[in-house]
Image: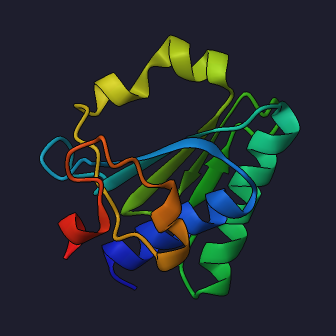
Amino acid sequence: MNIEELTQLVVNALEDVKAKDIKVFNTEGLTDQFERVVIASGTSNRQTRALAYSVSHEVKQAGGDVLGMEGQETGEWVLVDLGPVVCHCLQPNVRDYYNLEEIWGGKEVFLKANEECASRLMPHRPGHMPEDFE
């Protein structure tokens, strides 16, 4: 599975459990440890754990490897290490405090939108329309 497929799988798994404010960052030029960081918010400890479990389960179902998970005990911040992709599932107050978006340079990756997602795109943001992904 290539990096784009793995990243899309992670985003889809997060969306299935109603994650909020999902962002994907390209970290290739910033670290050699992984290529993408996915950040998502959950509304409770239970939901952040469910988000992480969904990511882990879907990646395993697709034949991918889950190298580790941390933070399930409290559920405030659960990290899922997939090797080239690292997924952070956080509660909003924890996400605001640590501001991971700033750490990873604010270079968000826009994934090719599926047809069913097109209605949720924000046309007022440059590079955020389906024709921009072609």
103 over 29 or under it: above or below? above
12 over 41 or under it: above or below? below
> 2 or 20, which lies in front?
20
> 63 or 19, which lies in front?
19
> 81 or 48, which lies in front?
48
Farthest right residue in view: 46
Location of the C terminus by quadrant is bottom left
Farthest left residue in view: 29
57 relative to 131 in the view: left or right:
right
Residue sitting at 42 percent across and 63 percent down? 83
54 relative to 118 in the view: left or right:
right
Rendered location of residue 39, percent (x, y): 50, 42
125 relative to 66 in the view: left or right:
left
128 relative to 44 in the view: left or right:
left
Residue sitting at 34 percent across and 73 percent down? 4
Which of the 4 quarters of the picture holds residue 110? bottom left
Residue sitting at 69 percent across and 53 percent down? 52
Rendered location of residue 41, percent (x, y): 63, 36
Location of the N terminus by quadrant is bottom left
Identify the coloring.
Answer: rainbow
Which of the 4 quarters of the picture holds residue 79? top right
Q: Exactly how many numbered labels are in the figure? A: 0
Residue 72 seen in this snapshot: yes
2 over 52 or under it: above or below? below
Residue 82 seen in this snapshot: no
90 over 67 or under it: above or below? above
Residue sitting at 33 percent across and 73 percent down? 3
Rendered location of residue 111, percent (x, y): 35, 64
